[in-house]
């Protein structure tokens, strides 16, 4: 499988990339992170992104639903091999809501929402049913881009004795990248599964994967991730905690 960034670099830049990039191994005790795969980021159904954004302006459209199918495949392998699964989901609204994610900052953005609008927001923040958490799996609510920022994620990873994070979800250039950077800064081995991540813009997806692979972790194929979880050490089931 060719890397996502193939064709983006000149021949000279490719030489620099190869010289700069070093082999980044994975550890033996992974957890699978599913970052923000909510309806607001994929839409209520698979359709072209130009149509999907009419309902949820943050949607990734068909790219998102392709990612959902791939995440579902990896989830099955992770669960079958005792690999802990951790989800993050966005929380919006309120004085301390996710201001970084708000597009509207005028008076219209501060209007009182109708019951219908509140329900639309609630559905948008719901994890897609096709990859919904199983009983006992951790769900972390976050208000920033990184899964680490202001959340108990680190505590759970320590409890599970995790040394590696397999990162999936959306968007590649936003919350996935922010989580990968923070994971590397916390000395975790980082694997980002290419087919299990998605973005609204192909160029953002490809460049972000290139940047992550160069600096913070290993960008790997879905097949490689599946093979990896089959050989990794499972966590102790009694260590798994849930937060909803």
Image (spheres, rainbow, N blue to C red):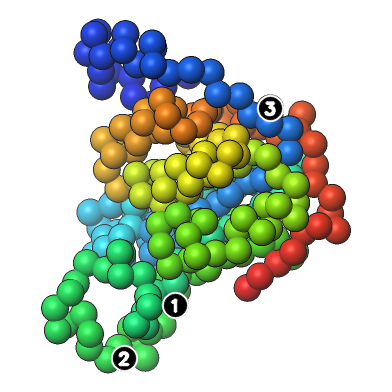
Q: Secondary structure at mark 3?
A: helix
Residue 39 visible at all: no
| In contact (CB < 8 Å): disc 3 and disc 2 | no
Disc on the earlier residue, 1 or 3: 1
| In contact (CB < 8 Å): disc 1 and disc 3 | no
Counting from the top left corner in percent of width and height, residue 171 is at 38, 49
The residue where tag 1 is placed is 122
Q: Secondary structure at mark 2?
A: loop
Query: Horizontal placement of 167 versus 84: left or right?
Result: left
Q: Relative to 22, is 81 above or below?
A: below
- Place residue 28 in its image quadrant: top right
Residue at 37 percent across and 91 percent down: it is 115
Cα–Cα span, label 2 and label 1: 12 Å
Q: Secondary structure at mark 1?
A: helix
Disc on the earlier residue, 2 or 1: 2
Residue at 25 percent across and 18 percent down: it is 9
Cα–Cα span, label 1 and label 3: 36 Å
Counting from the top left corner in percent of width and height, residue 33 is at 58, 49
Disc on the earlier residue, 3 or 2: 2
The residue where tag 3 is placed is 227
Residue at 80 percent across and 46 percent down: it is 235
- Judge by depth and name the residue closer to the eye, 157 or 106: 157
Q: Relative to 216, is 34 above or below?
A: below
Query: Horizontal placement of 18 versus 244: left or right?
Result: left
Residue 51 visible at all: yes
Counting from the top left corner in percent of width and height, residue 69 is at 53, 45
The residue where tag 2 is placed is 114
- Image disc number at residue 46: none
Query: Horizontal placement of 222 versus 122: left or right?
Result: right
- Judge by depth and name the residue closer to the eye, 174 or 222: 174
Cα–Cα span, label 3 and label 2: 48 Å
């Amino acid at each position: 499988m060719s890397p996502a960034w193939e064709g983006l670099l000149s021949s000279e830049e490719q030489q620099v990339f190869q010289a700069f990039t070093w082999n980044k191994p994975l550890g033996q005790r992974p957890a699978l992170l599913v970052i923000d795969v909510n309806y607001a980021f994929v839409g209520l159904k698979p359709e072209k992104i130009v149509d999907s954004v009419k309902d949820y302006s943050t949607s990734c459209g068909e790219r998102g639903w392709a990612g959902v199918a791939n995440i579902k495949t990896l989830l099955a392998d992770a669960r079958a091999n005792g690999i802990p699964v951790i989800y993050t989901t966005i929380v919006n609204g309120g004085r301390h809501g996710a201001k970084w994610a708000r597009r509207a900052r005028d008076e219209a953005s501060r209007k009182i929402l109708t019951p219908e609008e509140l329900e639309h927001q609630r559905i948008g923040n719901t994890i897609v049913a096709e990859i919904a958490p199983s009983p006992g799996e951790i769900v972390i609510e976050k208000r920033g881009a990184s899964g680490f920022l202001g959340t108990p994620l680190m505590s759970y990873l320590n409890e599970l004795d995790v040394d590696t994070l397999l990162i999936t979800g959306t968007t590649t250039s936003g919350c996935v990248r922010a989580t990968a950077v923070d994971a590397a800064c916390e000395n975790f081995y980082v694997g980002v599964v290419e087919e299990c991540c998605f973005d609204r813009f192909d160029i953002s997806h490809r460049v972000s994967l290139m940047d992550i692979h160069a600096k913070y972790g290993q960008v790997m194929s879905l097949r490689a991730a599946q093979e990896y979880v089959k050989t990794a050490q499972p966590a102790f089931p009694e260590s798994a905690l849930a937060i909803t």
